Amino acid sequence: MSAALDDTAQAYADVHSIAALLKAGRAIPYLGPALAPQAPGPRTPEALADFFASKVALPRRAKGNAWAAAQHIESYKHRSTVTTLMNAAFAAPVAPTALHSALARLGLPLIIESWYDDAMRAALAGTSTWGEVQGITRAGIGEDRWFRFYSPQGEPTSAAEAATWATLLYRPHGGVAPAHNYLISDSDYVEVLTEIDIQTPIPEDVRHRRSGRSFVFMGCRFHDQMLRSYARQIMKRSTERHYALLPDGPLTRNEARFLAEQGITPVTLPLNDAVSELLSVL
């Protein structure tokens, strides 16, 4: 019993450490879809794969895997079909949670949103001096670029302008707003992952803002190799002190190994309890 009490006390202490880092601007939230589990639209890669399967007949190898399903659709129909389906999957706006809104008020230098909905963007809309950078597919664009910058109004802008923003929202997989950019198919990720080790697909301003800061993963899963690869590369050259508020449920062996290898301390509370405690001290 005393060991369990000690674990709980440590978990609450970890949440308070996270709050202190956030309030000091020394932590980078890395947000996942489990923060808003009741929101409209797919909330996991597996649910997104099921959405694709409800619209297009998929081979067995692509079922249950969003990246493979999108690749099949792109290969046998057209990239525009993938984009149309993604637009439909994420058409309903996702209202910011209390945590999204609290993070927006902190004026953090960098926030990372790892899903395709617009909740964090909507939370920031009521603040000033922010903008975003999104990963983009290079399929059919005829340009040698990995990302695009957008003003709060959704207008394309430059890296020079982005460097002046107090808060940079980084959406490495793209997003439904403001321009329907999506990294989703296997071929999208093959292109990025062949270069990401040397950091080319990661904007220079993201690399600058992560330096010397901790990452706090909130509502993210890492059961897929691609998700782990992205997080690992985005974390490069930050500090060695990181935390995770994880979705409820057991970790896979690969997830547990990833957290240990990357120095990520999992907060051992149910996600709702961890978020409630964090909100109470922010």
Image: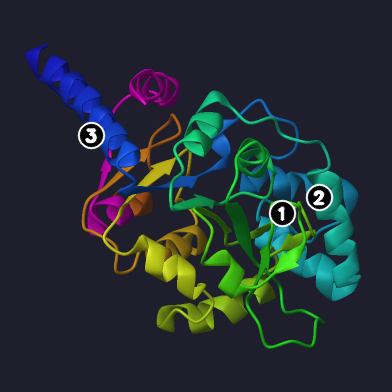
Q: Whole-percent x and y of residue 105?
A: 50, 34
Is 268 rendered above or below residue 188?
above
Residue at the spot of label 2: 53
Q: Which mark is residue 63?
A: 1
For badge 3, the amino acid type reads: Ser
Measured Cα–Cα span from mark 1 to mark 2 = 7 Å
Q: Is residue 148 left or right of residue 34?
A: right
Q: Is residue 227 left or right of residue 87?
A: left
For badge 1, the amino acid type reads: Lys
Measured Cα–Cα span from mark 2 to mark 3 = 42 Å
Picture residue at 72% right of the left edge, 50% below the top:
49
Q: Helix or strand or loop: what does disc 2 sit on?
A: helix
Q: Helix or strand or loop: what does disc 1 sit on?
A: loop
Measured Cα–Cα span from mark 1 to mark 3 = 41 Å
Q: Are marks 1 and 2 in contact (CB under 8 Å)?
A: yes
Q: Which mark is residue 135?
A: none
Is 190 rendered above or below residue 275?
below
The answer to whether one can see residue 61 in this image is: no
Q: Helix or strand or loop: what does disc 3 sit on?
A: helix
- Residue 234 falls in image quadrant: bottom left
Residue at the spot of label 3: 17
Q: Are marks 1 and 3 in contact (CB under 8 Å)?
A: no
Residue 279 part of the magenta segment: yes
Please state the extent of the stretch shown in magenta in the rendering: 257-282
Picture residue at 57% right of the left edge, 51% below the top:
129
Is 231 rendered above or below residue 280?
below
Residue 102 part of the magenta segment: no
Q: Residues within 10 Å of mark 1 (few under 14, many from 20)?
A: some
Q: Residues within 10 Å of mark 3 (few under 14, many from 20)?
A: few
Mark 1 and mark 3 lie on one chain; the one further toward the N terminus is 3
Q: The C terminus lies in which quarter of the figure? A: top left
Which one is nearer the viewer's eye here, 52 or 238? 238
